[in-house]
Image (cartoon, grey):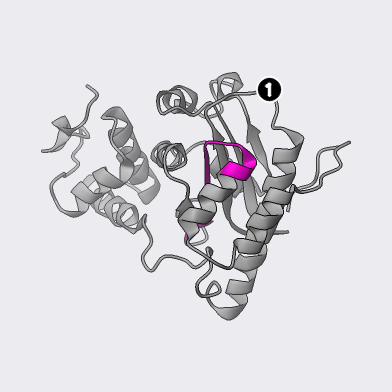
Amino acid sequence: MPTTPAGWTLLISDGMARVLRSLRHGYSGAVAVACAQVLEVDGVGVSLLAGGAQEVEPLWRSPGVAAHFEELQFTLGVGPGPDAALTGAVVLAPDLNRVRHDRWPGLPAEARKIGVGGACCFPLGLGAIRLGVLSVVTSRPSSTMPEQRYADALALGAALTGMLLEGDERGRAPSGTVMEPPGELHRAVVHQATGMVSVQLGVPLAEALLRLRAFAFGRDLPLGDVAGDVVARRLRFNDDMDGPQSGRGRKG
């Protein structure tokens, strides 16, 4: 797990201690809401690395802005979550308005539209082992992440990492816990659509995914919805990136 900022003495709150005791019991959605309440933020979510890549697969999250922000990051392919997954380090962006324009192109402006002012992401892993990302999202931008919130999020990330590592040793996450993976990956349709677009355009998979993302972002559509249209053959890509359902979005 990441190191503690210099000069901080981090002790978890009583509220987070109660949440950590509940991780092995109860419904994951309720736990996510409890985490957000203790951290005093608008949303909390956990994603897993899928297939050894830097793409993250949603596991659980509180309703509202956390889900919207995760979808935005996946559509654009940039953000604090992907960076945390890639580097294995905590990525703090408590005020997205202060992020360099070239760091996460398009993300801050789009985040404001969905009510997200700041996001801090904690990698789940140990050493070179990277398992996923814990994301903490707030509508209120601030100059720094409060020390207590950082301590509680760090402790939550460590507990989730332990559960994931325990699941790896057993071949799956402990049954009935919030870390039990879904039976079917939500992003599988995106990977399938990427392959189809790659064939349609005669381009590498990486470029095909970029084309999918550009199409989704340009029409203000979730990437998963566009991928679903491709897989269902309602949308076919050609050399000008257009398709029979190109007028479906809200932009352009």
Q: Is residue 90 left or right of residue 191?
A: right
Give x and y (percent) for residue 206: 40, 47
> Residue at horizontal 74%, vertical 47%?
13
Number of other residues with Cα within 10 Å of mark 1, as a class: few under 14, some 14 to 19, many 20 or more: few
The residue labelled by disc 1 is 143
Q: Give the extent of the magenta segment.
A: 37-50
Residue extending farthest to the right is: 7
Give x and y (percent) for residue 138: 55, 32
> Residue at horizontal 29%, vertical 28%?
218
Q: From what the image shows, is residue 219 above or below residue 71?
A: above
Query: Between 63 and 224, which is closer to the camera in this rendering?
Result: 63
Q: Quadrant of residue 77?
A: top left
> Residue at horizontal 50%, vertical 68%?
180
Give x and y (percent) for residue 7: 89, 36
Q: Quadrant of the N terminus?
A: bottom right
Q: Is 20 included in the stretch rendered in magenta?
A: no
Query: Between 220 and 179, which is closer to the camera in this rendering?
Result: 179
